[in-house]
């Protein structure tokens, strides 16, 4: 700013994710008339504001941020709207509902769903229930993210990057940049 160069977009992974998250949700609502991600309750707004890249390489900081990103994305999927257009089977949850919704539009993105399912498994196996590296799906997620005691910060950045990539992919598939 001092040099007269204005920033167009946030440059850190966490701030860019927040920017993209809001931008995507607005574009989606402009096109479809409903929010892709349900708004946070007032009691949960701190999740959005506290999302950040961990500053220390420890499991507690990492787990808190993974839990937050899952709550903002997977847990906030507008399942009610998604399921209006699909056939629901017993046991279908957010990610499966999204996958079925996309299939209606002939969109299949297996890598995106692999990421989302591994992210959900990581959250479930490491934090949501109890810290359990013995859980089969959690072990698979740890391998997917190549997570170890030395790379929590890097994996957190990777999760934010892939989350932005997910939003960009959906934005491109649904041509959300063409809405006014």
Image (cartoon, rainbow, N blue to C red):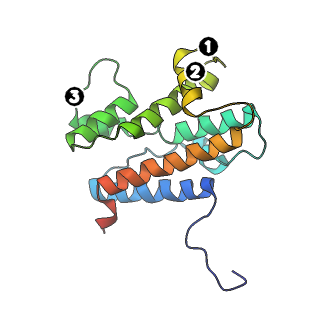
Q: Which residue is mark 3?
A: 87
Mark 2 Cα within 10 Å, few/some/many (few <14, many 20+)? some
Name which residue lies at 60% across and 19% down: 129
Residue 144 location (% of width, % of height): 54, 31
Residue lying at the far top of the rendered structure: 134
Residue situated in front as seen by the camera: 50 or 7 = 7
Mark 3 or 2, closer to the camera: 2
Image quadrant holding the N terminus, namely bottom right
Disc with the residue nearer the chain's start (3 vs 1): 3
Q: Which residue is mark 2?
A: 139
Q: Is residue 1 left or right of residue 95?
A: right
Image quadrant holding the C terminus, namely bottom left
Label 1, secondary structure: give it: loop
The answer to whether the residues at label 2 and label 1 have Cβ atoms under 8 Å apart is yes
The answer to whether the residues at label 3 and label 2 have Cβ atoms under 8 Å apart is no
Q: In the rendered image of this protein, does residue 63 appear above or below residue 137?
A: below
Q: Quadrant of residue 106?
A: top left
Residue situated in front as seen by the camera: 34 or 62 = 62
* Residue 153 seen by the camera: yes
Name which residue lies at 57% across and 27% down: 143
Mark 1 Cα within 10 Å, few/some/many (few <14, many 20+)? few
Q: Which residue is mark 1?
A: 134
Residue 66 location (% of width, % of height): 61, 36
């Amino acid at each position: 700013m001092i040099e007269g160069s204005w920033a167009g977009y946030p440059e850190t992974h966490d701030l860019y994710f927040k920017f993209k998250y809001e931008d995507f949700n607005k574009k989606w609502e402009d096109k479809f008339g409903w929010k892709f991600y349900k708004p946070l309750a007032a009691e949960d707004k701190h999740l959005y504001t506290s999302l950040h890249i961990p500053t220390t390489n420890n499991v507690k900081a990492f787990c808190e941020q993974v839990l937050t990103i899952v709550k903002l994305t997977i847990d906030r999927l507008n399942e009610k709207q998604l399921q209006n257009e699909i056939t629901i089977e017993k046991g279908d949850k957010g990610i499966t509902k999204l996958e079925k919704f996309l299939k209606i539009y002939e969109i299949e993105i297996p890598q995106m769903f692999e990421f989302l399912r591994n992210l959900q498994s990581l959250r479930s196996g490491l934090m949501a229930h109890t810290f359990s590296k013995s859980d089969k799906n959690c072990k698979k997620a740890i391998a997917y993210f190549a997570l170890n005691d030395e790379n929590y910060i890097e994996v957190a950045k990777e999760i934010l990057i892939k989350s932005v990539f997910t939003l960009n992919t959906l934005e491109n598939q649904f041509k959300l940049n063409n809405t006014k």
